[in-house]
Image (cartoon, coloured by chain):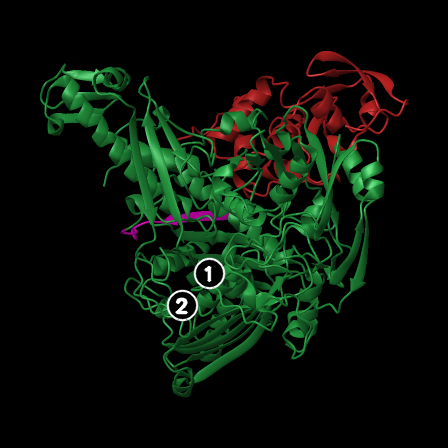
Chain colours: A green, B red
Amino acid sequence: MNFAAVGRGIPRRTGAIQAAGRAQYGVDFTLPRMLWGAIVRSEQSHARIVKVDVSRALAHPGVKAVVTGQEAPDGLYGARLRDEPIFAKDRVRYVGEPVAAVAAVDADTAAEAARLVKVEYEPLPHLFTTEEALREGAVLIHPDLGTYFHRRYDCHPVAGTNIASHIKIRKGDVNEGFARADVVYADAYHTQAVHCAYIEPHAAVADWDATGKLTVWSSTQCPFLVRSQLAIAMRMPVSRIRVLATAVGGGFGGKALMKIEGVCALLAQAAGRPVKMVLTRAEEFTATSVRHPFTIDIKTGARRDGTLVACEARLVIDNGAYSQAGDGVCWEATIGASGPYVVPHQKVDGLLVYTNRLPSGPFRGFGWPQATWAFEQNMDGIAHQLGMDPLEIRLQNAVEEGSISSTGEALHSVGLKACLQAAADSIGWDKRVKTPYRGYGLAAITKLSVPFTASSSFLKINEDGRVHLLTGAVDIGQGSDMALIQIAAEELGFSPDAIDVMQADTDSTPFDDGARSSRLTFHMGNAVRKAAADARQELLRRAADIMEVAAEDLVVQDGRVSVVGSPGRSMGIGELVVQSHWLCGGPILGRGSIADDDVVPMDPETGQSPHVAPYFEYGAQAVEVAIDPESGRVRVVRVVSAHDCGRAINPLAVEGQIEGGLAMGLGYALMEEVHFEEGRVTNPSFMDYLLPTSLDMPPVTSIIVEGFPHKDGPFGAKGVGEASTIGIAAAIGNAIFDATGRRIKDLPITWERMLEALEGDG
Amino acid sequence: MPRATGLAQAVQLTVNGKPQQGVIEPETLLLDYLRDHLELTGARRGCESGYCGACTVLLDGQPVHSCSVLAVTSRGSEVQTIEGTDATVRLLQEAFVARGAIQCGYCTPGIILTAKALLAENPRPSDVEVRVAISGNICRCTGYVKIVEAIQAVAAQMTGSGTRAVTR
């Protein structure tokens, strides 16, 4: 297929504005008469709130309002399981939980006054580990769990326990599977808490008009999700809430859900003035969310020839105090626990467990980096036992078109083997030489895009022939705006230069489920493509009337509508739109939408479904590492990251996603960890929480594997945003094993941990 | 913006080539002075501890984390922010856009200013020298690959040693 707009690496439209420092992020947004808010946070991990005394704060000069859990609305919000209030009411569940908030004339005054709020607690027993929380008779962090609203098909809370969700895969007969296995490899893995560490902190401004309508400007990935969570928590109808997305200084999942918007709105309401809030970096670490730590016990069985026959796994997931998408993470990771391989017999249990520390939340990869850390190291374990090459065993078992997945689906658009081969070829897998303390590792990658979401868009052709694309999608840096422009341009037959994307505004742009789960190219791409087709048809219908020819005889090219075979008979699009207003009436407005109407909820007992998610993305990563036996330092010499995204709508942006996700994966593998002591974060700053710098990035080869288009994707495209974050830790783990014969099972792979492994008995 | 303490000092400095007469509280950070007093918002707070570099500006040509500099100490200095564009900055801006070195863009102004300072001192840096120069600027989006490419493209362009055309 030849494309005019799709497949080109066109630079982002907002680039010049961003480079000039003129993009307006949440932190830059201001309103006249605006106050600043600060949050009073729990100092206790688990306690009953006895009394909140705000008198000193209220008397502090410059303070305009104080809000506490007592007067705040009592709606509980959440992703699938609704368990979280805007302010703690009767009990706090983690250090950092909002108890009250202050609005004052400036940020310093608000912070000072917040320290004057006195909260009296009666401590409750606390649970800092999933192990303690799962113990018989453990104190219940959410005694009302059984009454909470939850989405029934992918979240299964166990009332009377600390289990927020239990997801099961039961496929074939796992006992029979292991009976048929010639070798079994079992191990236990652990992953740590890490932070999204977007450089712009959470920022929002809230304002109420005289009729009681709320407007919120937020640095959010998902304005419609924020609107619905605000509506649920504040018990308001969605139409009385307007959410506008500002420019977003990085999200990575951390800005997908409501965070400070509710507090900000309640302060603005109490003060009768607009209120702005910007979190400090310390608050980001102690009171937003972290990636879910996992403990994974996994057992894999294979025949002598390397064919996988069985997998049994138990994933225990630290949810923290509230389910900020933990329900979804648990669901996805359970599906992914056995990897992108054909495994006929499986038994997998995913347990999402409450603990008394800050909530775990959505983070690029959504459970798959954790699951992959385990199953991809187990694959190498099996290969080692069988004396097989790690590439060979993967190619032998990897899913392909028509393979049956862990959830019983016949898979479609599967470029996994091509990715594995491309990554291996590029790193020189077959030519690798055994050198002391140097090794090579591979990891296969897959991830599904979350089901039951929707996107919609309007496409308006203006009187100068330019196009306004109205969507609720937010370009948080990933490049969705240009991808959508290219899709619209291709379908319309317009130049991408003639198309602009409007700012997401829940009052005027149509519904969308947000920039998450690598879903915008696929979902919004489809919605935009349909809107463009609709607008094009309308344009031609009106052109046919105005030009008095049959619509079938018209073509759109070079910004004009022309009559086929009659050179010289054409009209500029702008001119057509203007005439159409007077001659036909109304704007030329296309509409398009997509729903996951063919997705089937999985059986809650077996986890089986004929079509569990809109699509799966695939990839493979290969690394070469060099280990310093003196210090334990693991140096990544080279990384190759190969990805099947169906079709790259914009290869420049796809490469950007691969490179950026990979850097994040490296940080996860080697450096990053949020440390806790007694439920309290002990390294809440960039001084103590290490992030990859320019010096930590090894040479990178990004490979886009095409040839496996998705039948439902716009021009065959799927998402790619999360994939390169997923496999890198496991690839490094496998390379370390290759280099040293030692297997690291806990992340991150610090120098100390590596040294310990080298010094141990192996 | 800190409240008046009565200790404010008159401070003269040059910002983007324009003389500024500021009455500045002693604890006011250069970042806040630029953002709140002069409404130059291209420098942004990321970590408030001098680690992320989103607040980078040039102080007498040298990149500094303006969240860690008291405004009063820049008395008599020349400050350049991203708003004070010049030929090198413009080339860097264009290269960053063309080569996909910008994703969320929050760190971009700081990195462009750091790169300008580097190229002023070292017109033809090695990749490692570029990486060392920008190692005080965290970019969480790009993995730095395209940032290094963009800076090197400008270095090549400015020293006339040829540049790879962007063919995409």
User: Alpha carbon of mark 2 to alpha carbon of mark 1: how far?
Assistant: 36 Å
Q: Which stretch is magenta?
A: A698-711
Q: Residue furthest front?
A: A211
Q: In the picture, which quadrant includes the N terminus of chain A?
A: top left
Residue B103 position in % (x across, y down)? 52, 37
- In the rendered image, the vertical position of residue A761 relative to residue A725, given as above or below: below
Secondary structure found at label 2: helix
Q: What's under tag 2, amino acid-wise?
A: Arg
Name the residue located 51 percent from the left edge and 57 percent from the top edge: A366
**Residue position for label 1:** A151
Name the residue located 77 percent from the left edge and 37 percent from the top edge: A110
Secondary structure found at label 1: loop
Q: In the picture, which quadrant includes the C terminus of chain A?
A: bottom right
Residue A90 position in % (x across, y down)? 71, 58
- The chain letter under disc 2 is A
Residue A689 position in % (x across, y down)? 70, 51
Query: Which of the two discs, 2 and 1, sits closer to the camera?
Result: 1
Q: Nearer the viewer, residue A678 or A401?
A: A678
Q: What's under tag 1, amino acid-wise?
A: Arg
Find out whether residue A478 is within the magenta segment.
no
Residue A95 position in % (x across, y down)? 73, 56
